Image (tube, rainbow, N blue to C red):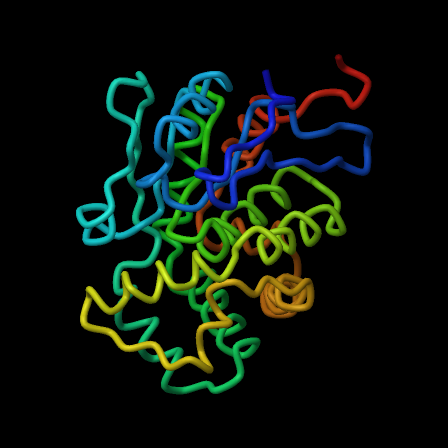
Amino acid sequence: MTDQAIPRELVNFRAVTGVTADGQRLRPGSLYRSAGLDQIGAPGRLHLHDLGVYTVLDLRTAEEMSLRANDLAGLGIAEVRVPLVVDLDGNATKAVRESTDPLLTLEWFYEDIVENAADGLREVFDTLTRVESPVVLVCTAGKDRTGVVVALLQLALGIQLNDVIAGYAESEAQLNSDWIATVVERFESLGMTIPPEATGIFTMSPPSVMLRLVETITDRYGSMAQYFEHIGISHRVQTILRGEFLEDHEAS
């Protein structure tokens, strides 16, 4: 039932797609991405059930999860928690204070993830070799932490860069003004004030930012393969993931 319309309660929810240079593709119905699943209501719960989702891999911090628990009770979905950014409050505050340009803020945040969250990234990749699919990767917006993880996973699978960037860029059209107001309220509940000029970081997903991140990694480490080796994501893990998430493009 993967051709169903996605209910509006599932914010920024979509399948992860893409093809490799050698004619493989991400297996349809195996991997999805989303904003937090805390307010999905009956329509969202039914959609997850109909998709046969088996695992939700949550990248949010423990505090975020405690404030906005995913609404998955009774669905038989395994919830795995791998907080990707330990000090989200500090990171967000620093980003807002040190950059008035949302593009620069996103670039800083994404570089911070790939450089300083290696343990979390490695755990995410290792976890994906063990859990049952379909898998949904989530964070608060489904854009930044999820966006970086999905992009790195796609690149490790050999998905072409154009597909990686296009998939990331879709978030901007998915996140509306009502959602921004909800996120600002959440930050305020944590004692943080987000100035109006900085709210763009909650919806923006320009292709240039993801391209810049990939260029930064390859410039610094020589290649994506060397980056993965540097942070401890082994060839064995990547091979297992290719077997789990890729199929021949002609497969039905």
Q: How many marks?
A: 0
Q: Look at 54% across and 26% down and name the residue there.
A: 240
Q: Residue drawn 66% across and 35% down? A: 17
Residue 182, x across and y down, in percent: 35, 58
Considering depth in this image, is 86 or 38 the residue closer to the camera? 38
Is 28 on the left-hand or right-hand side of 89?
A: right
209 or 13: which is nearer to us? 13
Q: Is residue 96 above or below residue 183?
A: below
Left or right side of 106 for 189: left
Nearest the viewer among 157 and 4 is 4
- What residue is rendered at 49% in x and 62% in y? 177
Q: Is residue 231 above or below residue 205?
A: above
Above-or-below relation of 58 to 23: below
Q: Position of residue 163 (x, y in %)?
A: 73, 46
Q: Farthest residue to the top: give it.
A: 252
Position of the C terminus by quadrant? top right
Quadrant housing residue 113: bottom left
Q: Residue drawn 54% across and 72% down? A: 107
In this picture, residue 23 sits left or right of residue 200: right
| Between 196 and 129, the one nearer to me in the picture | 196
Picture coordinates of residue 139, whole percent (x, y): 39, 48
Q: Quadrant of the N terminus?
A: top right
Indicate the quadrant where residue 74 lies.
top left
Which x, y percent locates residue 122? Answer: 41, 45
